[in-house]
Amino acid sequence: MQETIVEREEGALLSQRLEAAMMTSTMRNRFTSPAPGTTRWTLDCEIAFRGVWKVFGVLGRPLLVRKTRTDMERFRALV
């Protein structure tokens, strides 16, 4: 796997691309402050599977969404 930082704005944005034999994933993390002392984290993620992994992409979408939300909640609890 190879991960590349595509775009970075300190405190506001982090975009990265992950490339592997089975897929390519692009993630865009945006951070905004809707009120003083708060931070909103928005994650946009696109995953393109290759070959037979495309089946997993279709069938595994709910699992991927749930796993991402769980990871974000764990990060929130840590911070």
Image (cartoon, grey):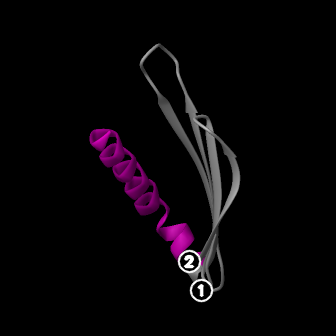
Number of residues whose C-alpha sits closer than 10 Å to that of mark 2, classed few (under 14), some (14–19) or many (20 or more)? few
The stretch drawn in magenta includes residue 78: yes
Question: In the rendered view of the protein, which quadrant contains the N terminus?
Answer: bottom right
Residue 22, label in figure: none
Q: Residue 38, how many percent across, how many down?
A: 43, 22
Rendered image quadrant of residue 64: bottom left
The structure residue drawn at horizontal position 51% and vertical position 75%, both measured from the top left corner, is 56
| Neighbour tally class for label 1: few under 14, some 14-19, many 20 plus, Cα within 10 Å | few
Which quadrant: the C terminus? Answer: top left
Residue at far top of view? 36
Tell me where the magenta segment starts and ends, as one range: 54-79
Q: Is residue 25 above or below residue 42?
A: below
Numbered badge on residue 52: 1
Callout 1: SS: loop
Q: Is residue 72 placed above or below 31 in the rendered structure? A: below
**Secondary structure mainly formed by the magenta segment:** helix
Whole-percent x, y for residue 27 in the image: 61, 54
Residue that carries the numbered disc 2 in the rendered image: 55
Instruction: Give amino acid for label 1.
Output: Val
SS for callout 2: helix
The answer to whether the residue labelled 1 contacts the one labelled 2, judged by CB atoms less than 8 Å apart, is yes
The residue at 47%/68% (across/down) is 60
Front in this rendered view, residue 59 or 33: 33
* Residue for point 48% across, 14% down: 35
Looking at the rendering, which quadrant does residue 9 occupy? Answer: top right
- Residue type for callout 2: Val
